[in-house]
């Protein structure tokens, strides 16, 4: 059964994003790399200590990125799971960090430096020791991973039919229940007009597959039902299929291996420019370009 693999968003300020997700939320920068479609754009991966699929939030950092406009088919913000007894801890921590937090009995809501909506939602799981990040967040209070993606759309029936086709399961009250307590929630859109990507926009989200052979099978299913196949891609750390849903959102299906230790040892993830093998011969070119922009991947 599939679960969430990662979510990918846009930011205009790499440094502020790194500070927030590491120093405030306590995640680890597990891969400090570049956009494989445009090597002049940084790509930051945050997650648990090992960068386990399901724990990962990524950002494409685009200088001078403008304000976003959410249209009727805009993917929602970031929903992260926290241990069930940690709501008070996180409320206090976020307030001390200067965040404006809305607290209910069931979640904490705030925005990150890119104006991305972030929700911390209690769930009955704590991280095992091997996945905890060594920082000032106690291991039994650390964020455990992604838990939900909100999908507001103008045509809920078409969207649910897409995921029912691709996942092979029916929704329950407009929600697809995935492994590890994860969910996809299909909501009616409350906005109108034309969406424009900008700070805090979600570029796409990814769902796991058990093995690489599942990707062409899913591609065949998508094609048979008239859904647009954007591309098959080898990202090095995982292989992917990208499909457009009826709302023109980019939906990725990704393998869980080989993982982020492909090019870096576990204890040093994110400490230098991370590159999959097919980009290794461009390392000097990439580092030279970013030095002209004041970026040192070793900082």
Image (cartoon, grey):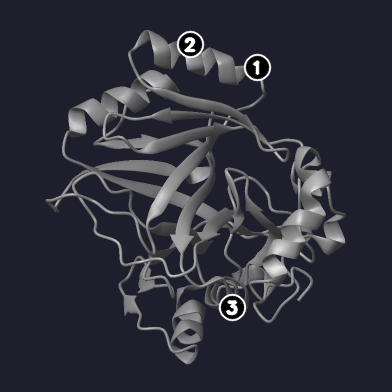
Residues at marks 2 and 3, CA–CA distance in whole angstroms: 42 Å
Residues at marks 2 and 1, CA–CA distance in whole angstroms: 12 Å
Where residue 218 appears, as percent x and y from the top left, is: 50, 18
Judging depth in this view, the residue of 143 and 277 nearest the camera is: 277
Q: What residue sits 49% from the left and 51% below the top?
A: 8
Secondary structure under the numbered disc 3 in the rendered image: helix
Query: Image quadrant of residue 133?
Result: bottom right
Judging depth in this view, the residue of 120 and 73 nearest the camera is: 73
Secondary structure under the numbered disc 1 in the rendered image: loop
Query: Closer to the N terminus: mark 2 or mark 1?
Result: 1
Where residue 178 appears, as percent x and y from the top left, is: 46, 36
Secondary structure under the numbered disc 2 in the rendered image: helix
Query: Closer to the N terminus: mark 1 or mark 3?
Result: 3
Q: Which mark is residue 220?
A: 2
Q: What residue sits 18% from the left and 47% below the top?
A: 72
Quadrant containing the N terminus in the rendered view:
top right
Residue furthest to the top in view is 224
Horizontal side, residue 154 vs residue 6: left or right:
left
Quadrant containing the C terminus in the rendered view:
bottom right
Horizontal side, residue 26 vs residue 66: left or right:
right
Horizontal side, residue 170 vs residue 130: left or right:
left
Task: Tell me whether the residue at label 1 lies in contact with that at label 3, contact meaning CB atoms closer than 8 angstroms.
Answer: no
- What residue is pinned by disc 3? 19
- What residue is pinned by disc 1? 213
Judging depth in this view, the residue of 130 and 78 nearest the camera is: 78
Where residue 60 appears, as percent x and y from the top left, is: 53, 57
Q: What residue sits 60% from the left and 56% below the top?
A: 40
């Amino acid at each position: 059964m599939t679960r969430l693999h990662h979510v990918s968003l846009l930011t205009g300020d790499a440094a502020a994003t790194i500070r927030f997700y590491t120093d405030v939320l306590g995640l680890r920068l597990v891969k400090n790399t570049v956009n494989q479609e445009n090597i002049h754009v940084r790509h930051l991966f945050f997650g648990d200590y090992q960068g386990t699929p399901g724990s990962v939030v990524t950002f494409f950092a685009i200088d001078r990125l403008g304000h976003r406009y959410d249209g009727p088919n805009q993917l929602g913000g970031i929903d992260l799971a926290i241990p069930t007894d940690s709501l008070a801890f996180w409320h206090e921590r976020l307030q001390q960090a200067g965040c404006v937090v809305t607290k209910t009995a069931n979640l904490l809501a705030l925005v990150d430096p890119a104006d991305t909506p972030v929700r911390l939602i209690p769930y009955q799981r704590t991280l095992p020791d091997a996945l905890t990040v060594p920082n000032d967040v106690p291991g039994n209070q650390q964020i455990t991973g992604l838990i939900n993606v909100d999908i507001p759309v103008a045509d809920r029936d078409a969207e649910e039919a897409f995921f029912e086709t691709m996942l092979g399961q029916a929704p329950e009250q407009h929600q697809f229940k995935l492994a590890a307590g994860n969910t996809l929630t299909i909501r009616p859109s409350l906005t109108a007009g034309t969406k424009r990507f900008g700070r805090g926009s979600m570029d796409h989200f990814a769902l796991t597959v058990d093995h690489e052979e599942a990707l062409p099978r899913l591609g065949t299913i998508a094609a048979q039902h008239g859904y647009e196949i954007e591309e098959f891609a080898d990202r090095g750390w995982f292989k992917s299929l990208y499909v457009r849903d009826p709302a023109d959102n980019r939906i990725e299906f990704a393998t869980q291996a080989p993982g982020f230790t492909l090019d870096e040892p576990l204890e040093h993830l994110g400490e230098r420019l991370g590159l999959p093998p097919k980009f290794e011969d461009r390392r000097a070119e990439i580092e030279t370009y970013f030095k002209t922009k004041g970026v040192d991947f070793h900082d």
